[in-house]
Image: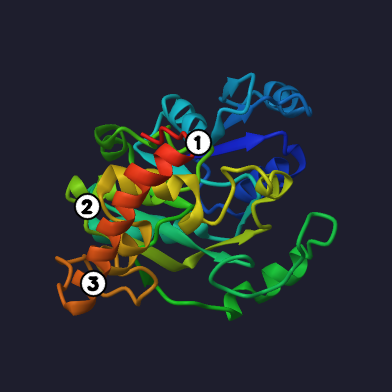
Amino acid sequence: MFSIIIPTFNNIDYLKKCIESIKKNSTFHTHEIIPHVNDGSDGTLDFLKKNSFNYSHTKHNSGICTGMNMAAQKSNTNYLLYAHDDFYFCPKWDFILKKELDKIKHNKFYLSGTMVNNGQIDLDCGSDLKTFDEKKLLNEINNVNYYDFQGSTWAPHLIHKEIWNKVGGFSEEFFPGTGSDPDLNMKLWKHGVRIFKGINDFKVYHFGSIVTRKYKNHPTIKTESGSRGAKIFLLKWGISIYFFKKFILNSDTKYTGELKKPKKNINYFLQLFLCKLNFFYVKYIYNINNKHNLI
């Protein structure tokens, strides 16, 4: 049914737990799990080979975007589900997605889940595998809720493979990945996708960007709005990620159906003007002074 693409970078214990949760908590058992292995010298490669997984591999850390694109090429289903290796999939996740797909009946959609811990729902069942209380999570997960929300731009997300191929997948200039999700959403928007739905019942427990924490001082690993990726997005599309999420995707508001054209009020034009000023700064001052060539 779904091709679950999981980029991973020497994070074998979390990858194993993620895969275990998919197998344990799936309603259907026709999914394929396709990791992309960055490096893999921690035993990840050996584990995948031993268990006959279909996977892609780069000897270096190629980042999320390249990894996702490479692994997606190995997919044998019509649906690509992008997941982090530090996700734990909660029960019936696939049944919930299948029910949603049955209602949509076309392939122009972007469906995502709700993250528990380090996400929309605050339920602490541990910050790492050593402290993870799986029993608590499974006992309480149905009692904690968010709501179906508009304008999601993050994993786990499901896209039809035909649409993924038409927009070219992830844009690899957003290495290692920050800013790539809203960029993908912008490409989908330009392609006519108007369903950007976060599904409350499709829940994953998120340990919280375990790999990213290791490299928190790396210059490309910052908050989305202040990252190199945010500047690339601005130069590429002429607006900021903040503007795109707020005025076009209506992000994190309650889901009411397919998105319409944005409402162009005074605040819209003010924020658009600020985007243009920031665009000028990044393109003509930041790039020159810092000797960057962002795009």
* First in residue order: circle 2 vs circle 3: 2
Q: Name the residue under label 3.
A: 270
Task: Name which residue type carries label 3.
Answer: Leu
Question: Which residue occupies the foreground of this view, 111 or 289?
Answer: 289
Q: Nearer the viewer, mark 2 or mark 3?
A: 3
Q: In this view, does 1 lie to the left or right of 165?
A: right
Judging from the image, what secondary structure is the residue with disc 3 in?
helix
Judging from the image, what secondary structure is the residue with disc 2 in?
loop
Q: In this view, does 136 lie to the left or right of 34?
A: right
Q: Can residue 258 be seen in this view?
A: yes
Q: Give the crowd class for mark 1: few <14, some 14-19, many >=20 residues within 10 Å.
A: some
In this picture the colour scheme is rainbow
Tell me if label 2 and label 3 are in contact, CB under 8 Å: no
Residue at mark 1 to residue at mark 3: CA–CA distance: 31 Å
Q: Is residue 66 left or right of residue 241?
A: right
Task: Name which residue type carries label 2.
Answer: Val
Q: Give the crowd class for mark 2: few <14, some 14-19, many >=20 residues within 10 Å.
A: some
- Image quadrant holding the C terminus, namely top left
Q: Mark 2 points at which residue?
A: 193
Q: Is residue 159 visible?
A: no
Residue 159, image x and y in percent? 35, 46
The residue depicted at 32 percent of the width and 68 percent of the height is 246
Residue 175, image x and y in percent? 50, 36
